[in-house]
Amino acid sequence: MPRNVRIEKLGFYHIINRGVARTNIYLSDEDYLQFLEIVQDASDEYSFEMYSFCLMNNHYHLLLKTYDKNLSAAMQKINSRYSIYYNNKYKRVGPLWQGRFKSWFVYDEVYLHTLVRYIEFNPIKANITQNIGQYTWAMSSNNVLLPMLHFDIIQKIDFTNLMSEEEQRKLDVFLNTKLDIKEDTLIKKEKHKIESYFENLTHTRENATYKAISDGYTQKEVGNYLGLSHVTISKMLKNYKQKIKLFKKLRDKGIFWSYSKNVSYEDIGSWLFVEYLLKYGDFDDIKLGFELFGKRYMKKVWEEKLKSDKGFIKTNLMLARVFFDMDVESNYFREVKNERFEKLKLLAS
């Protein structure tokens, strides 16, 4: 599924990013300060202001107000500069962030105030501190004073009580609302009825679930419709995302050379994907395929598409012995008949 195009409109944005594999991205006070100084430099260059922030050990929340349509460029520079600083300091290599940053355009003042409460309550929710203002690396502590920081919204908000269930529900609605922009005007995208995702015969249940949640339905809503628990839906999504990740890895290696370079997992389908995985994937990829699709499904594809193919005798021998617990030799595959071909030949006679 292609990435959603970011909204580029002047105004408030809630920004989140996490360390790769949820690893810590700040290991000392110096790291927190360095990150904020990098953000300040970006503020000077890209013209934005900060109205709330909270830097947790493995992720950050920022509430920015932009004055130019350059949010993506600004955040890319911030994340890149800090990653270079962190990797140099701690003698590490590889990506620091789990992916591109997440951003939400704040289209309503009620949500703006709710977001500030949500951001500043993060350390309390994580049981790090007990009261607002105690956590050093949240804006409400007043521990850091930089030109980009504006405290007028925080000073107007009552932090006496924790966020209520109603506030959290409204915030969930905000985070899951899809927006479009036409002629510089924001339009809320209307959600399809949930049943429409599962009535489409071209979608698997995994794919339909992924699409419904991507379009703004919560895991709870999809689970209620399917009669499945939140945990089951969560596992299904995780499994589906891993399949997409593995597919993209193989696609980028050129395995699907006869298709468009932008072909998607949805276009190919699981059956053809598993066939190509068994034929051309390396051992670790195939092993992961068994974890994601299950032994029964993998064997079914193998028996129909690969087992009788004389061009893959060595591959078939490895699959049979390692993954299907078959005590066979290579001669076994030289004698295997293509059952589908035999049936077609019989019908044609």
Image (cartoon, rainbow, N blue to C red):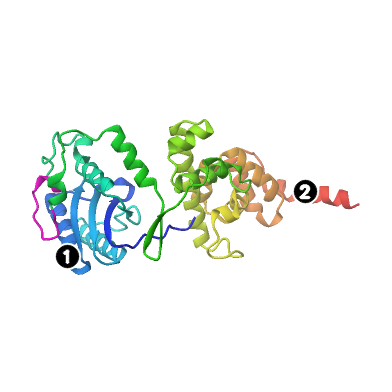
- The residue where tag 2 is placed is 340
Nearer to us in this view, 15 or 68: 68
Q: Main secondary structure of the magenta part?
A: loop
Q: Quadrant of residue 7?
A: bottom left
Distance (Cα) linking label 1 and label 2: 66 Å
In this rendering, position of residue 229 left or right of residue 47? right
Q: Quadrant of residue 295?
A: top right
Q: Amino acid at mark 2?
A: Arg
Identify the magenta region.
Answer: 139-150
Which mark's residue is nearer the viewer, 1 or 2? 1
Q: Earlier in the sequence, mark 1 or mark 2?
A: 1
Q: Quadrant of residue 9?
A: bottom left
Nearer to us in this view, 146 or 32: 146
The furthest residue to the bottom: 45
- The residue where tag 1 is placed is 41
In this rendering, position of residue 109 left or right of residue 327? left
- Report helix, strand or loop for mark 2: helix
In the displayed structure, would residue 292 be above or below residue 99?
above
Residue 246 visible to an observer of this rendering: yes
Q: Residues within 10 Å of mark 2 (few under 14, many from 20)?
A: few
- Report helix, strand or loop for mark 1: helix
Q: Amino acid at mark 1?
A: Asp
Q: Position of residue 80 (x, y in %)?
A: 27, 62
For the point 82% across and 47% down, the residue is 343
Nearer to us in this view, 296 or 173: 173
